[in-house]
Image (tube, rainbow, N blue to C red):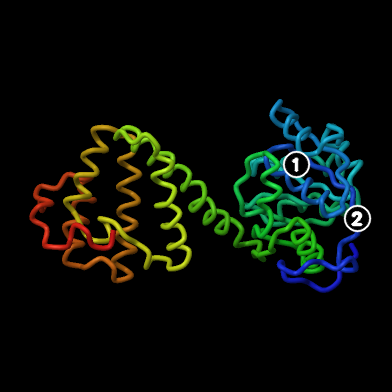
Amino acid sequence: MNVNAPHAAHEPLDARDRPARLTVGVVGAGRVGPALAAALRLAGHRPVAVSGVSDASVRRAAALLPDVPLVTPAEVLARAELVLLTVPDDALPGLVEGLAETGAVRPGQLIVHTSGRYGTRVLEPALRAGALPLALHPAMTFTGTSVDVQRLAGCSFGVTAPEELRLAAEALVIEMGGEPEWVAEEARPLYHAALALGANHLVTLVAQSMELLRTAGVEAPDRMLGPLLGAALDNALRSGDAALTGPVARGDAGTVAAHVAQLREHAPQAVAGYLAMARTTADRALAHGLLKPELAEDLLDVLADGGRPETGRPDDDAPDGAGGEDR
């Protein structure tokens, strides 16, 4: 690899600082691999082979990597200098072991996986065969379409690599339009859990919220939620826990109890999630001084009782201004 000094992600790479032009192969034509290979193609590398089994994989490969032949995983490794292993996390260790045992891995070959869970230790069988291991995980959700290539611009990549390959890893990420963020081998599972907690669970929460709004008679829940969620996300990224609002942060135990009662009636499958998130929100609001201790007791009693308070303050008994405070 012909890589010189590291660059900030927002600075264009000079031709002298680019890694050598590489032939690129993809094992696993899911949503991630073809997009990364397409981004590498834009940077001057040459995709030469891709493997995929399902009809969806074949269609994605044809759309994002036209004219790149669909071959077996072993043939991908035979043709490519840089191999992207873009398979599900649980399938990765067995795939690497199998490729190494069959002699498909070549000395000097760059073997890159995109799993957030693993660092380079999972590539140990390939390393023993002489390969150069990199873990490059794009912290972005993929659609499997050409829009993913555009979204890579400014996308952070969780990068783990041997010290001697750090510059090569950084250069590849920058060439794909991303920004490298170094993650230690032992921190990879926690790093991945943090991303899943934020991104994957966000999709679940938003989809559930839209279903409830439809049940409540809202015709365009996406239009209603868009500005609200956009502002909430922006505030959270800027201010963290200080951005907490709503009945839990205010200590409105009666409102929370009413929410749970409605969910039990109309969407019982949403109750457990609501209570779990409300308890976590209450804990964080208390810890950061947002939830007053004298209001927290009733609220926590409601949450501990699964939203069934023996007594509760009616909404019309709230002190003046409480109903509209910090919403």
> Who's the residue at 31% across and 60% down the image?
245
Viewer-side residue, 128 vs 165: 165
Q: Amino acid at mark 1?
A: Pro
| Position of residue 242 in the picture relative to residue 262 (left or right) | right
Indicate which disc, 1 or 2, sits on the residue closer to the N terminus: 2
Q: Is residue 12 above or below residue 230?
A: below
- Label 1 belongs to which residue? 34
Viewer-side residue, 104 vs 220: 220
- Label 2 belongs to which residue? 21
In the picture, the quarter occupied by the C terminus is bottom left
> Who's the residue at 76% across and 39% down the image?
64
Viewer-side residue, 124 vs 201: 201
> Who's the residue at 91% across and 42% down the image?
79
Residue 92: which quarter of the image? top right
- Which mark is on residue 114? none
Q: Amino acid at mark 2?
A: Arg
Q: How many marks?
A: 2
